[in-house]
Image (tube, grey):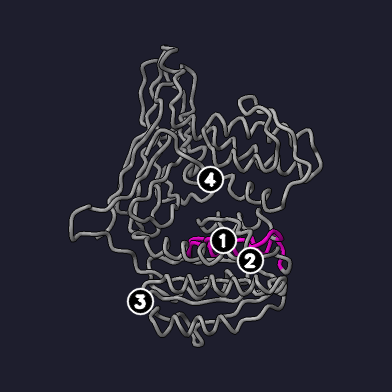
Amino acid sequence: MGLEFGVEVFQNEYLPQGAGQVDAIVTVTAGGTGAPGREVEPAAAAEVVVIDTSGSMDYPPTKLAAAKRATAAAVDALRDGVRFAVVAGTDTARVVYPNGPGMEVAGPATRAAAKKAVNRLHADGGTAMGQWLLLADRLFAGQDAELRHAILLTDGENQHETPERLTEVLEHVAGGFTCDCRGVGTNWRVAELRRISEALLGSVDIVADPADLAEDFRSMAVAAMGKAVADVSLRLWTPEHAEVRFLKQAAPTLVDLTGWRVESAPRVGDYPTGAWAAGESRDYHLCVRVRPAGVGDRMLASRVSLVDPAGAVLGQGRVLAVWTDDVALSTRINAEVAQHTGQAELASAIREGLEARRAGDAERATARLGRAVRLAHETGNTDTARLLAGVVEVQDAPTGTVRLRRQVADADEMTLDTRSTVTRRIGRA
């Protein structure tokens, strides 16, 4: 049995005369039938685990040992029948398991064989993540599984490949599979892994202590195995003389989907959302520019449809625009729109503040990180507020008065950076 989806639209549809921008938060929720004996079945899946085996993984040796244990944990979490493979990444990429072409079917014997092969790995060579992704893409290409998911682990920078080459690879493999990225230690670049995870609709995070890798890998594999529907898209219709200014996933993490639009019909574009599991709920911030109209005029600014790969509509909502001369109506700010706008600004302030700090611009770093502290306080984002306190001394959160800490652990700064795009809903389940 597949999922049942709900689509809700939160907005203030009233605009003052002369205005032409409509903002709305679209909440998509996936649920099962709830009926006994009709539980949601997971989608047919294929999994590739890609681990960095470059020379730096041997410094200290416990890092590679932890990566092997983590890979074993992910393999153990795969359902019987799932196709899988393990890839070792250096300045090239090679399949560690299986020995033959393609993927192997998960089961007791193949899991044991995969873990035995992984245990023989040693660290040597450089880092070219594009090569790793291309090999994963070739492995997935031979599978008919609906869900194609990869885990990528690295401890360093993409030194043996140009940024342009990585961009070419990401453009080539996008849409072929999703990928959750992890950086172990503190010698990798957050921006680099974020590029990969955003292009492949996955997550990015830091695992500062290698000892924590196994549980993280197990959690990612379990989450992937729970997905029931893959390749779902948001389809936006807009009327003549209107255009989508942007579409961003606003929760649980910030991801700009604007550039991923694929035209599917005149004035209709599809935006990928990836795979869904029962119980998942995500928010999307839609901004549409329409032609201003007269007081009393009303229009459908956008029709939002959730569609499967065959184009079947799974859920639908409407974004409206109504022009009024009632100031009380047109100046009312929808709570959901305000909350997500504030959290998007929070993420920008953190990123700009950290960039200024690295550049030695203390004045700008203090101003932007102070702004971030204030926004985290106002939006009730206590997790981000706690991470900010590791980088600045907070003197007064409501006003954003802070002082840069002289000594900041690399792990604290990278954790704040990687998790700056994690958002939180306030006042809703």
Q: Is residue 208 positioned above or below 62 on the image? A: above
The CA span between labels 3 and 2 is 28 Å
Q: Find disc 1 in the rendering and name its residue.
A: 181
The mark found on residue 369 in the picture is none
What is the distance, in whole Å, between disc 3 and disc 1 at their CAs? 24 Å
Closer to the camera, 81 or 92?
Answer: 81
Image location of residue 208, percent across then percent down: 63, 58
- Location of residue 203 in the rendering, given as x and y in whole percent from the top left corner: 53, 55
Residue drawn at (42%, 64%), measured in percent from left and top? 222
Mark 2 surroundings within 10 Å by alpha-carbon count, few (fewer than 14), some (14 through 19), many (20 or more): many
- Residue 88 x, y percent position in the rendering: 60, 76
Q: Is residue 335 left or right of residue 172?
A: left
Residue position marked by numbered label 3 in the rendering: 81
| Magenta part of the chain | 161-187
Q: Amino acid at mark 4?
A: Val
Mark 2: which secondary structure?
A: strand
Q: Earlier in the sequence, mark 3 or mark 1?
A: 3
